[in-house]
Image (cartoon, rainbow, N blue to C red):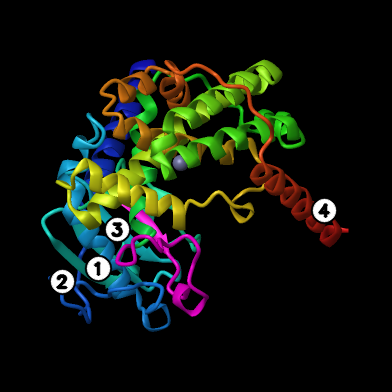
Amino acid sequence: MIRKRFFILMVILICTIGLISCNRNEKTEINPIDMEVNIGQLPYDDLEKEWSVMNMDKYILRTAQQIWSTWSSVDKIWPGVDFSKYNVLYVSTDGENAWLINPKNEITKFSGKDLPDKFKATGEEMSFTSSEETLNGKPTIKVEVNPKMFEEPYSVSEFKSLPTGTNLFPFTVHEEFHHYQNTWKINDINQEELLQEGIENFEARQERLEILNCLNKAVLDPDKETQYLEAAKWWFNKYKMDNEKEYNMIKSIDILEGTARYFDMAVNVRSIKGMDISEDEVFKVYQNMVREDYTFSSDRFFGLPDEESYDIGGLCGIILEKQNNKEWKKESENGTPPLEILLKNYKQTPQEPSPEVKKIIEDIKLKREQLNNEEE
Ligand SMILES: [Zn+2]
């Protein structure tokens, strides 16, 4: 009896495996729809100016061109990262259209209804699935786009500093980079506990924003880099002393989000300016991005501890790149946040609170009050 049961179980198991592998080999039929674009040409010159006449075909073609110009060489930006085998699928949130981009300079538009269930639209804008999923046997990244986005005002997520770029490209790059962080030596993160610890701790918020302010100035005014980094060191030491618990919790996010921000910035610039852009040139573009897009201003902060991690890491990364530091990427993978790596050899210089940070903290408190009043 036991044997018979075992036999039946085996038969069921083998059939199931058969079905699964059958499903895997099932081809998704792709019936191309014409795109009103010329894939060899820039579909626009200035996204902001042309926003009201933009359409998804042009926007996604431009994203595809950014993919084609960087996809096979991102390991030059972060050793070990290899996107060269990945297709990218953009799907409109209404499920109507899909655009499949492969690394061989090909883009195909087709009906989103032809997609297998795992790739069908969920309706959630910018929802992301990594290259672990395959479509027709190829590892395929999927991102959902809102087909009505151009009916809304020009989005602040787009890049004024890179008028021929898209936000969709660095978003895709950033999210896929996270996929590579699974093997890094990082402590587990309890995001909820961190939020509780940090959201009302305005002393910690002020100290981290002071660090950010110093890094921002070090990038925009590199003649005084040492001075600003010594100031950052003082704020960093103070922050660690005053907020030991938060500091230990935030380290992991500073590494994960900070390096991902650096990586998406570095790939974004090169997708427009070319992989062989010189060190001087690339730094100038980074400066423009910081000046125009990653601005140190109230509208970009709500006083959450993890929101600071992105800019801190991004700015540290571009300074470390300028300093030609060859070790920092490995050190980050081994669990040291970019800020600690950058400031390691600087002394500290005592500081006074800055008017810039004071203003941002006041604005954050105001924003929260308004939100509370709206809720009541
Ligand atoms: Zn991220």
Q: Can you see residue 265?
A: yes
Between discs 2 and 4, the one toward the N terminus:
2
The residue carrying mark 1 is 61
Q: Secondary structure at mark 3?
A: strand
Distance, label 2 to label 4, CA atoms, is 49 Å
| Quadrant of res 50 | bottom left
Q: Cβ–Cβ below 8 Å for labels 2 and 1?
A: yes
Q: Secondary structure at mark 2?
A: loop
Image quarter in which the N terminus is found: top left
Relative to 239, is 253 on the left or the right? left
Disc 4 target residue: 369
**Of marks 1 and 3, which one's residue comes earlier in the chain?**
1
What is the CA distance from the residue labelled 2 to the residue labelled 1?
7 Å
Q: Which residue is mark 2?
A: 39
Q: Which residues are magenta?
A: 141-165
Instruction: Locate residue 305: give its quadrant.
Output: top right
Residue type at mark 3 is Leu
User: Which callout, 2 or 1, points at the residue further toward the start of the chain?
Assistant: 2
Neighbor class of circle 4 (other Cα within 10 Å; few <14, some 14-19, many 20+) is: few
